[in-house]
Amino acid sequence: MSSAAWMAANLVYRPLAAKSFRLLHVSSGEGSQPIYASLRHADLSDDQRPRYETISYAWGDPTPVAEILVNDQLLLVPANTETVLKWVRHVDRERVPWIDAVCINQVDIHERSAQVVCMGGIYSGSSCNLVFLGMLEEDMTFRVLETIDDINQDASSDTDDFRSLGATLSNNGASLKWSATPFAFKVDRDAEIALLELPLLRRLWVLQEVALAPRNVALLGSIELELLDVLRAIRWDQYKEWNIKLSPAATAGRSCGSRLFEFVDREHGWYAGSSVNISDLIQCGHIFEKTQLRDGVYATAGLLSRDQVSNLRPDYTKPLAEVLAIATRSAIEESRNLWLFRDINHRDDDLDSGGIPSWAVRVDREWDGGVDGDGLPGDHGRSYTPAGVYPIDREDANLTILHVQGIIVGSVDEVTPPLRNEFGQFCTFCILLKGFCKAKAGLCDVSFRAVAEALIAGDRPDGTRADNRDIDAAQEFFTYLSEPREPAESARAEHEAAASCYFGHASNRCMFLNEGGKPGLGPRVMRKGDTVAALHGAPFPVVLRSDLQGRHQLVGPAYLQGIVHCEVEAIFHAMRDRETVFELR
């Protein structure tokens, strides 16, 4: 931060007392007229504090380049902040919003940490939250509004005026459902993409803001509408046409918008009538965009109870590795299982670079479909703490070390390169995998059917468990693709869609064979010689890598036939004399 910025901040901001925050009193104006405003302190504990609104928006480039006049002093703010203030100010009277880039002294890291703690009270205590979606061309704006209306009418028709919406979208909040049929009407795809690509949908801070606000009004340019209508349309679109290909930005926007819906719809959303746990918020940190690396943990802390947040109090001076380790450990201790390990996605040099514990979920970065795999399937709705209590406490507890108990069930004998989500690459992958199986067949029994089951990770595309017919179909398709032939051009699109549908879990993962020839699906960074283990508290096996000191790195979750969908418990019962403690670093 430049010395000029520090000087300007010192002139504009007075220190805040505990539980105090600033409100921005914005003078009337219109068009390109400059922003004139004043900052005044308010107290969260004061029932007589002024009526105010909050603003949710996408920062964009956080560099302070735009000038506004605050307390008769020039203050530099991000360009998007100035734009939003010009859009929401009244023409004929003062407006009193709370907006983070101005109401928090951004050059004071200690104040930022303290104000993040207060944001739950700030948003829940507002009269309304103004959600600035962004601006589109006038014609596209109305096409987007029409598309939102069309999709919501379809949802209303299919769910008895939304009465059965929650039951249609999920299995009692345990797992998502997917429609077997697409829309019966033609969706305006350009309008759909224009909506889904709006940057605000992908901003992590927005999740906490819209979940806490008593009401959310969306602003699309000068048009106002209920944010719930926007998010419900996005969620229904995801449910109906989950397998269509969109741009990366639209794909991320739909995923994030659907997650926002689960928090905002207090009657039908995933969290309707239930509390939020730390694991839920860590998973959100994966898919949303962040300005600061630590925001992956801190940007949603306002949704947690006082007891939950005790170990996660925002502190932007803490090392990133410590923040991620504390968040992951807190989630594990709260849930008392290792379900969160399904979100471990190491990239090529993560395990060699050190610093971040291998078992810590990397919520400091966004999920990238080009290198990261989707979470492997498992069974929700039950506890994974067989034959003992988890976690294992040690007196010499080190924040970067996690002790887990389990059984070694095999080692990696052969491993393919990671599969990329491209049809040509998939055919090459199948041919290579078939060659591995044939080479191994002379030493042990390798089943192509088991290979096909591993490729689909034992699941149907809709997330339900595959039956024999599904596995037979996957085997037939795998066998077909493993023959070195080029499909006819007329059939290529159909084959690509089928490959994506059948083998989505395999994208950005490796296939492996253990020493007994049993096939599995594992993380992209696994290698020959790694260990496969079943852990107490995990509904799936994991791949571990040992070091010279006898410690292990968590390479990632895996699928191995016979050690998923709760068969883990049977493994522990049969092999309890082989249990050991793994020291994960």
Image (spheres, rainbow, N blue to C red):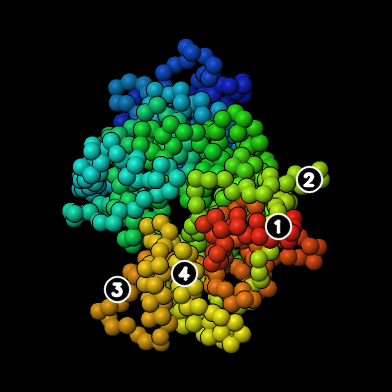
Q: CA–CA distance between discs 1 and 4?
A: 27 Å
Q: Residue at x 36, y 50 (%)?
A: 177
How far across and down, in percent of the image, does residue 283 sit? 52, 48
Q: Secondary structure at mark 4?
A: helix
| Crowd band around label 3 with a 10 angstrom C-alpha radius: few (<14), some (14–19), many (20+) | few
Compared to residue 392, the image places residue 302 above or below, namely above
- The amino acid pointed to by label 2 is Arg
The disc at residue 453 is 4
Q: CA–CA distance between discs 3 and 4?
A: 23 Å
Q: CA–CA distance between discs 2 and 3?
A: 55 Å
Q: CA–CA distance between discs 1 and 2?
A: 21 Å
Q: Nearer the viewer, mark 1 or mark 3?
A: 1
Q: Secondary structure at mark 1?
A: helix
The disc at residue 576 is 1
Can the viewer see residue 484 in this picture? yes
Q: Nearer the viewer, residue 441 or 399?
A: 441
Residue extending farthest to the top is 48
- The amino acid pointed to by label 1 is Arg
The disc at residue 493 is 3
